[in-house]
Image: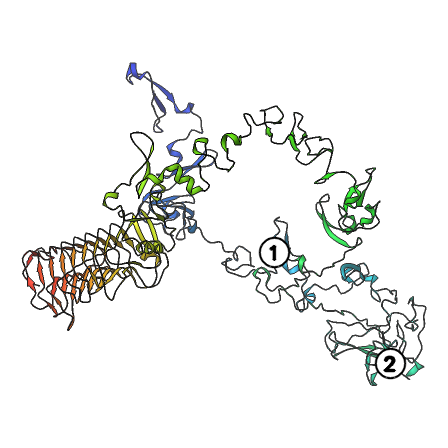
Amino acid sequence: MGVQLSDQGSIIKTAYEAEANAYTDTKNTTLASLDANALLDSDFAAAEGFMRKTGAGAYEAIKTNMSAAVTPTVNEDSGDGYAVGSRWFDTTADKEYVCLDATVGAAVWIETTGGGGGGVTAHSALTELDYTSAGHTGFAANPAVANLDMNSKKIENLLAGSAAADSVRYDQVLRRAAADINSFTEKVTPINADVMLIEDSTAFYAKKKVQVGNLPSGGSSLPVIDTTNIVKGSVDATKLMRFDVGGIAHDTTRVMTVPDANITLCDTAEVMLLDGSQTMGNNLSVGLHYVFGQGYRGTSDSLFTTFAGGPGSADSSRLIIFGKSTIQTGRMSFAILDAAKTGTVIAMQMEGGTDTPIVDINYGLDMNTKKIENLLAGSAAADSVRYDQVMRRAAGDINSFAEKTTPVNADMVIIEDSAASYAKKKVQVGNLPGGGGSTTWTGLTDTLGVITANQLVVGNATGTSLQFIAPSALNVDKVDSCDAGVATGNVFKIPASIAQGDVFFVDASGNIVRLGAGTTGHFLKTQGAATNPVWAAVPGGGDMLKSTYDSNEDGIFAIAQGGSGQTTAQAAIDALSAVSGATNEHVLTKDTGTGNASWKAAPGAASGGDAAYTIAANDTPATLKNRADVSCNAVSDETDINTAFATYDTVKLTEGTFIIDGSISMGSNQSLIGSGPRTIIKLKDSFNSGISMFVNSDTTGGNTHMLISNLTIDGNRANQTTGYQYGIVWDTVTEGAIKDCWVKGLRTDSIRFIADCKHCQIIDNFFVDSKWGPCVEGGSEYVLVEGNTIWKILMDGIYIEKASHVSVKNNTIVASGQFSDNSYAGIFLSAAVGEEANYCDIQGNTIRDGGETNNPQYAIKINSAHCNHTLIANNDCYDCAQAGTFYDNGTNTNWGAGNRKLNGTWATGA
């Protein structure tokens, strides 16, 4: 049913029975019958926006901008219809903003989203709190880097406390800094009930509180003076202990009114209560060190002393305590040394007859030298406190205290009472749970009065106490301190009646029981579960009759009687195997036809046998190791190989990795043959020194007929940092061949014919990741370098220097010169005066740059005029180098046909 509302007329037209009447029948209803609070379009003045109810029957539409293309400014304000809560969507930057203040010309919009492109809420867009403007005047604008004002802020959780209540006002901590007490509010008229802090000298200077009125000679009423305060000097009894007054500035004058008219001097040996009934003699002046108008008086070490020979015939041994009186001399002055006793005088003067009391006499607290400066980053230098008197939570705090190595029961420790909200209390050591005090062992002794070495602690006969007793006094059988007798509770208790040869077993009750030694020659027979073992005779046993098996009693049994008929092991083997009738160098094997053992010629024996020696690596599979003559251990494996070459001419290596740190040396007519690329001869990690992994044994007279084939030579360059490491270096070798090898990871040359190598071959090998590929040098000649694949060599792919009649044919060279761009060649040929390179031919090679980062300078480079009559033909050098295809500085170079240049054209010369 659809409804159409109109406030222009006075009716609401309602469509009903639409299917039957197709809106032809209507029912008119007057607006007057609607609820007065019905929400109509006329309730909103704005043309668009989000609806918001502002009161009973009152609504508004908060303007939005759903398709803005820019960021709102201070001018998008109430004059434009915006209000607090308006939303602004920047569809270009994918950001949303909300209006917090719509004041005309000063609107405030805050971003509520992250960056464009679907960003998350950006916390960084929130305005940083201004602690100062918020009333927190102890913080700077950036509290992360500012100092904390310790006079207005609390130290939260001081000493790693976790509760929020663990806080303290730093400016309420008493420090030792100068003028710390002076900074407190002063009470100018203290009374007796006021409390102050002292340290108790009779209780290890523990801090306690004391009422002002109870201080010795202190308070507003007359105190009790006792011998604690009046102390004679230990050397000179006429001298009295003085007390120091700190905190009073030098030359400060105080006027003092005597509080009582009746006072009597008290001898230092007397105890006197000044209750106002005493009288004081006339014409008496009192001074310390100095009396105005009379100079220094008294001894230098006294506190108060009368004038020797002065008015009143006062004795200098008497201490004068005075109350209120008219001093006949008119005035009395005295002085007090400063706290450091350096002689600085703080003078005080009393005028006779005046009633002006001494007030505001302060003392200063010396905080000594240990302070906590700027606690919690406080910036004021005066914000410091003595820390060595604060119990801290830091490790080693208690350990820093002086130790009492022999504590007694009466000593006190501090604990926290778990039954009283962990309030701190003191406990005597002797009252600790478990008896913190000491206990004498003599109280445990009722057999021996003293403890001696090697005694046992055992219960006494009545079980009422412990006793010390020697083991010999325990006259019962012991096995590992267990009583002999009947076992109970599966405890191993050895029965009392035992003898040599007895055995023990567990019976049906779980007890350990004894089985006697039994009959000689019997064996211990088990009879299965739930049955005890027994001694039994050997079944079928019996004596071997000498008359049958050894009739002549010579100790030898014939083969027919189950023996060998021989007296030695070797003779027995020979007799049993019938080796005496076999052909030399035959082997004992199983005959296929009869199944019997038979001596036969070894396989291959007709041609002299297999003279090769097989060596396995440490990681060679077990099945191959079993066939090898020896196995290496991955430590200096060249030793086993060189040992084999001392006897054999052919050495075969199984699959596996042979780790070497020395050279493998081969002689004439010797071959080293691997089992393919998985036969790896590898230089050990971090060798970092010079080495040639393969050498020939005679570099003077030379070697001939040498072969290295079918294996991998790994210089392990990735795990070396220094050293010249070569793969194969031959010097003066004739008719040698290196073929079907994988050569990689050398810090220098892969293969180097260093001098006078003739009629040698480097064929069908794979070279990668070494400094140079194959190198032929030093007068070598008639060398064939053919069919090799050379890839990612750091410098020149093939290097020929001072060598003649070298054929470089049908090699594939890709990505040489990786050490530096545009510097090296695929094939490099050079010579020198008197050391020419003559009649070399370079034919049928394929050279490419390989698309690597660095490229060779030239495909083929003839570097010297002493390279004579070089033939270059049929080389494919398409896309091969940076500077050019060929470089020819040789003499009489023969440019044959079929050389394709790097740009695809055909060359007839360099």
Q: Nearer the viewer, residue 668 or 809?
A: 668
Discs 1/2, front = 1
Colour mapping: rainbow
For badge 1, the amino acid type reads Ile
For label 2, the residue is 330
**Is 647 above or below relative to 185?**
above
For label 1, the residue is 155
Element under disc 2: loop
Q: In the image, residue 857 lies at what x, y percent?
A: 17, 62
Which disc, if any, is residue 547?
A: none
Residue 851 seen in render: no
Residue neighbourhood size for the residue with mark 2, other residues' Cα within 10 Å, grouped as few (<14), some (14–19), many (≥20) = few
Residue neighbourhood size for the residue with mark 1, other residues' Cα within 10 Å, grouped as few (<14), some (14–19), many (≥20) = some
Query: Outermost residue, top direction?
Result: 20
Q: Residue drawn at (87%, 73%), measured in percent from left and top?
A: 232
Q: Distance between the Cα atoms at labels 1 and 2?
A: 56 Å
Quarter placement of the C terminus: bottom left
Q: In the image, residue 352 lies at what x, y percent?
A: 86, 77
